[in-house]
Every structure is written in C-alpha cells, then in structure tokens.
Amino acid sequence: MKVLVTGAAGFLGKSVTETLSKMTADVTGLDIVGGHNILKCDLTNAGETSKTLKGRVFDAVIHLAGIRGSLKEMNRVNVRGTANLLNGFHSPPGCFVLASSCAVYGIPEDVGGCVNENSPTAPITDYGQTMLKKEQVAGEICSTRGIPMTSARIFNLFGARQSPSMMTSAVARKLVKIYSGSVQPPLQTGPLHTRRDLIDSDDAAQALVLMAVEKTAGNFNVGTGIPVSGDEVVNTLQDILETQVPVRINSEFNPMVESIYADISKIQSVLRWKPSVPFRTTLTAIVNYWLKQENARQQFDHSPAQ
C-alpha cells in the first residue's frame, strides 16, 4: 500500500508515519521543511506541488499539513494548499483522508458539550472557519475527480512531542520547570474549569490510518468521548510529579466554549476503532519528555565553558 502523508514532519505526522511503517506500508512523507525520507514541498505553490507529485501514484493520501496563525495565512496554507495538493495529482489517489478539527463545530448545542457528525458546523474562530472551508474545498475537488474522501474531525491532540504552545504541553512544561527549581511558583495558567476531549496522538494516528486502509468516506469524529477539565489535567500532572504547587488563574482569558467532546459512536460502529491509550499514560509520557528536556538544558547550562 503506497501512502502519501503531508505534514509528515509535524507532531501528528510523526505518529502517522510510524504507525504506517509498522504496517510495512510504502510511505512517502511530504512537508515544507523536508527531512529524512520526506519530500520538501510548499503546497501553497501550485507549480511546485504539481512538479513534486508528477509520476507518483498513491493508494491513499493522509493530509495533515496545516497551520494556526493569521486568517490570511491559514486561508493560504490550510485552504489553498489543500486545493493545490488535490489538483496537483496527475493520477487521482485511491482515497483522501483529511485531518480536520472539532473547531468546525463552534459552540455545541448540547448543554454538556457533546457533538456528533450531524451537529451544526458554526465555527467561532478563524482557525475553525478555515478548517471548515478546507473540508468544503476538498469535498468539491474530490467529488469532481471521483476520489473517496474522509474528514477526520480531530479533537484536542496531546502527546510527548507536542509544541508547548498547546495547553497540556505548556502546563506540563511549566510544572516540570517549577519541580526542577528553574522557575519559581506559582503555576500561572488560564481558566481550568473548561472541559475538552483530549486524545493521544498515537490513538488519532491509528484512526487516520484505518480510514486510509478502509477507504472510508464522510465525516468522522476522532476523540475519546470523555470530557476532561483543566483542573483534572493539572492535578494529574502534579500527582505524577509527586509535587503540589500553588496555581494562579489568569481571569482575563474568557473561553467562548465551556465544554466540547466527541460522540464517537460512528467511528466505533463503522471502523471498530476506539482509543486505547489511558489519559494518565499520555500525561506521564509528556512529563517524562519535559523532564528529559529540562535535564539536558541544565546540564548544558552547567557545562564548562569551551
């Protein structure tokens, strides 16, 4: 099975390519930064994309490439880049799996925050708007070219290699720095009462790969179906570190979505998939990752001058 993975050098991309490699799939990575066994390509450049894809035929494409940033940049990369990718194939792939986001739902109608694939799509953020537009553009092109397409609406990813710009990784990093003595308490964070559906990147990767193998079509929520509060995240991280530090909440940040989590009955029914990595296991991996980074930093800072 020949599979193209865009955004292969990214956080989720690494998990997806590792999952495919374990299946002995023939994996081609594509990313703007390039890398080992990864084609360097800027998807916002239609000519470059077409040239890069020339002569290449794939049984499946898992499209992860995308950014968070200004609305202009997200439209350029997330939307136009997706169109360039699909139009750049000289031979249509066997199926197209697009990594979308729960941000397309906006504020859930359900009081508790549960959303299913039939819930209204009314994004309230620029990111959510570009992800919905990305779905729509990809759907139009795939329909025209006869390519089976799946939109994987992924909820809140977390894992050991995630950027500290994301909430769970950021909090874990701050706690590790306080634990290691390089930063003084308290732990400063945004509101912790909000609830999100946190899914391990390896679980999400398994779902995406399964969609490619089965050549599914339509929209699928990819989450755990369990809402977790920020308080639960902080308390579990402190328990893992066996430490307790005071927490200071920044009340200036007012989240528009209090709670959102996935109804995953569709993906469970159609693909027999369910998440398997326990919440605490992922948090432990994140803590160990940042402990390793902090230890390496401290050793460097205390190494003799050359």
Image (cartoon, grey):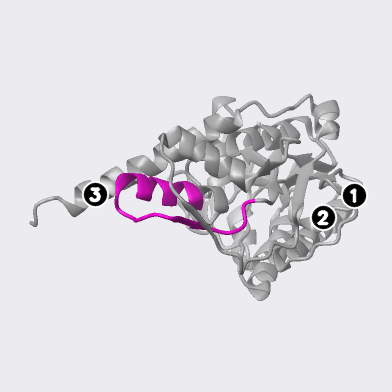
Q: Quadrant of the C terminus?
A: bottom left
Task: Residue at 48%, 57% (x, y): give it.
Answer: 33
Judge whether 106 appears above or below 147 on screen: below
Residue 212 drawn in magenta: no
Locate residue 46: give its quadrant. Answer: bottom right
Q: Earlier in the sequence, mark 3 or mark 1?
A: 1
Out of 87 and 162, give the one closest to the viewer: 162
* Residue that mark 1 sits on: 119
Marks 1 and 2: CB-CB under 8 Å?
yes
Residue 183 in view (yes/no): yes
Q: CA distance from mark 2 to mark 3?
A: 43 Å
Q: CA distance from mark 1 to mark 2?
A: 7 Å
Residue 91 placement (x, y as % from top left): 73, 48
Residue 171 drawn in magenta: yes
* Residue that mark 2 sits on: 105
**Numbered label tally:** 3
Is 287 positioned to the left or the right of 261 in the image?
Answer: left
Q: Earlier in the sequence, mark 2 or mark 3?
A: 2
Q: CA distance from mark 3 to mark 1?
A: 48 Å
Which range is magenta?
Answer: 170-192
Residue 123 placement (x, y as % from top left): 80, 62
Residue 49 placement (x, y as % from top left): 62, 60
